[in-house]
């Protein structure tokens, strides 16, 4: 039984932290399975996912973002994709579209350090999306190159 199957059984979970730092062998299917498991954690209030130094793509980020959309009770999100060289503004746009709909969100930490394909226009769009989060009390964004 894999991680995704175990997570699905934790239906009353409130906080989840997973660290995949430098796990370059994560497959697209593995990420899809993780996303499907996350969707079932409907009581989740806080999530911390670290995919730094992984081979995450825009498509992967879009799939993970779509899963977050289902977690309407989220108050805290910490996502790290630093050094994921394939992520561009397209992936960031998808994430922003989901984040702006999470009206309970109070704390947001995004780390896209050394994601060299992210351009200024997508950062501007993310800023516009985040302005819609009226409950947001804490924000930490890293886009250093």
Image: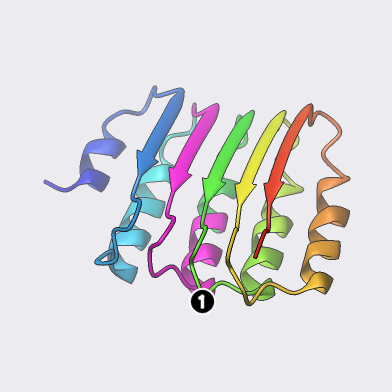
Tell how many labels.
Answer: 1
Please name the residue that numbered disc 1 is placed on.
86
Q: Nearer the viewer, residue 117 or 71?
A: 117
Q: Position of residue 55 (x, y in %)?
A: 39, 70
| Residue 43 position (above or below residue 61) | above
Q: Position of residue 60 (x, y in %)?
A: 46, 67
User: In the current view of this chain or complex, which residue is farthest to the front?
Assistant: 145
Q: Which residues are magenta?
A: 43-65
Whether residue 119 is in magenta: the answer is no
Whether residue 49 is in magenta: the answer is yes
- Left or right for 108, reference 48: right
Callout 1 secondary element: loop
- Residue at horizontal 62%, vertical 36%? 72
Point out the image quarter for the C terminus: bottom right
Q: Position of residue 1 (x, y in %)?
A: 11, 46
| Residue 56 position (above or below residue 20) | below
- Left or right for 28, reference 126: left
Q: Position of residue 80 (x, y in %)?
A: 52, 50
Question: Residue 105: which quarter of the image?
Answer: top right
- Residue at horizontal 46%, vertical 22%? 14
């Amino acid at each position: 039984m894999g991680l995704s199957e175990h997570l699905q059984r934790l239906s009353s979970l409130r906080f989840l932290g997973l660290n995949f730092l430098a796990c370059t062998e994560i497959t697209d299917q593995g990420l899809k399975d993780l996303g499907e498991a996350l969707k079932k954690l409907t009581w989740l209030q806080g999530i911390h996912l670290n995919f730094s130094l992984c081979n995450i793509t825009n498509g992967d980020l879009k799939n993970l973002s779509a899963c977050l959309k289902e977690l309407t009770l989220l108050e805290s999100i910490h996502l790290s994709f630093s050094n994921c060289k394939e992520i561009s503004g397209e992936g960031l746009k998808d994430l922003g579209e989901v984040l702006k709909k999470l009206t309970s969100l109070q704390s947001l930490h995004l780390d896209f350090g050394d994601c060299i394909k992210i351009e200024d226009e997508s950062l501007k769009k993310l800023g516009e999306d985040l302005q819609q989060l009226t409950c947001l009390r804490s924000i930490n964004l890293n886009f250093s190159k």
